[in-house]
Amino acid sequence: MGKTIKNIVIAVFAVLAGNALYAQSNSNTFKVPAYEKFTLSNGLTIYLMEQHEVPTISLSVIIPAGAIYDGPKAGLASLTASALQFGTKSYTKNLIEDELDFAGANLETYASKESAGLSAKFASKDQDKILPIIKEILINPTFNAEEFAKEKKRVLVGLEQAKESPRSVINSYYDKLIFGDHVYGNPVSGSPLTINKFTVEDLKSFYSANYSATGSAIAIVGDFDTKEMKAKASKLFAEWRKGTRQQNLASQPVAVPASARVLLVNKEDARETTFLIGGLGISRNNPDYVAIDVVNTVFGGRFTSMLNDELRVNSGLTYGANSRFSTLKNSGTFAISTFTANKTTGPAINKALEVLNTLHSKGINEENLTSAKNYVKGLLPPKFETSGQLAGLLTSMFWYDYDESYINNFEKNVNELTAMKVKQIINTYFTKDKLQFVLIGKAAEIKEIAGKLGTVIEKQIKADGF
């Protein structure tokens, strides 16, 4: 019996190893699967991609109706997106939920900084039941007043709870510091002050102004016949009204900070300091996007990064540190992120800055560059394994205006990254001057530290908004 179990274990490991080698050897063959793209007369762009491995269909919708259109009513885009599911002309909220539950389907509506969206997954055999529901949610929502009141209360409770966790809100503070009065500074979640004032009419007005087929896209990926789905989708979504092309409110340039600044957010009961350090980043369609990803992998994008090694492994100042580029259509941010005990706030910030300076002074050696190249190449295929991931890819390509060459040429572009190009990437994109800081912690214990970093702006975490 023991020998049999041992043989089984060996066989399992052999299969796993073989699969890993197969994936590695075939990573360079990964391409975006074939798809069809067409535009309806109302301006809606539709992507169709057949994938017959699993009998399911995934759908992704993207609409120019994000928080950048909130104006003074912060949080309106997010609440409007949630309320799409509160009932339609043909379906009550309960009926929508019952139909989805019975079919084992998943459906979510949401808003982000720039756009609103819908994602869904359902069995291919249920497409004629689920697709009409999706159409109704997008085209004929009624914004039930009773359900709106319930959701409003949930949102307000959520906002209050979020302020108890610095990591839940620090990005909103950071965006406001970096972008200021630019629409990219609008907090997606809103604030109690704004949310409290919303009425159903606000949601209806926002929907009427921002939700239309024009400038929107739908991607459908999965187990279907393209010809049949094209006819079906064209008939269903031709009913969506044609709107006027949305003005890109985010196209205005973002002001570059003139000096180092520190947003110090006081959380009186905090035992640790959560902080971000950085500045302006890049837009998603930046031609150096792939090269930046590779360099950032070495700096702070994986567990064995420079930042994590120095702040966690070597010094024990934190349980984890990373860096990231958060990209939007017209701009973005770069940030070093970590947290530490109150008493080690100064050493942790100094160590993070030291690592950033080391990146600039010493660059990346060939061994680490090769390792990072292999790492990012290995991560690409798993990002697009499922129909949902592929549907999201297609709407992302539409929104950020890039094509499949980003995927199809990914490995080639990674391999061509040279040491000289790495130096250029570091000098251009990894901000080290006029840095912007957000520190959330007990102000009395870290204010002196903050004052050494730049001009200090103080806020209370319990204050409304960001």
Image (tube, helix red, strand yellow):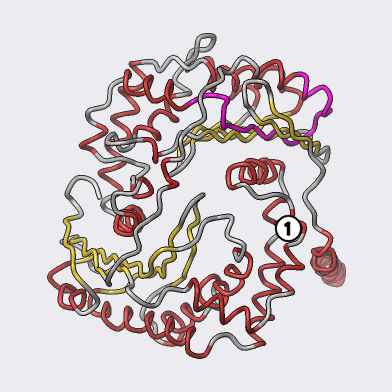
Please tell me in which quadrant of the rendered image residue 435 appears: bottom left
Left or right: where 247 falls relative to 44: left
Give me the residue at 45% from left, 57% from top: 332
Please tell me in which quadrant of the rendered image residue 49 appears: top right
x, y percentage for residue 235?
71, 15
Residue segment shown in magenta: 211-231
Image quadrant containing the N terminus:
bottom right
**Within the magenta stretch, is there residue 412?**
no
Q: Tell me the residue that label 1 is attached to.
A: 381
Rendered view: 372 above or below 461: below
Left or right: where 41 falls relative to 167: right
**Within the magenta stretch, is there residue 227?**
yes
Rendered view: 194 above or below 95: below
Q: Nearer the viewer, residue 195 or 47?
A: 47
Give me the residue at 33% from left, 52% from top: 172
Mark 1 secondary-structure assignment: helix
Give me the residue at 46% from left, 33% from top: 65
View extreme (top): residue: 90
Please tell me in which quadrant of the rendered image residue 231 appears: top right
x, y percentage for residue 124?
75, 28
Q: Amino acid at mark 1?
A: Pro
x, y percentage for residue 151?
35, 28
Is residue 116 shown to the viewer in this render?
Answer: yes
Q: Residues within 10 Å of mark 1 (few under 14, many from 20)?
A: some
Q: Nearer the viewer, residue 54 or 323?
A: 323
x, y percentage for residue 189?
35, 41
Is residue 1 shown to the viewer in this render?
Answer: no
Give me the residue at 72% from left, 63% from top: 410
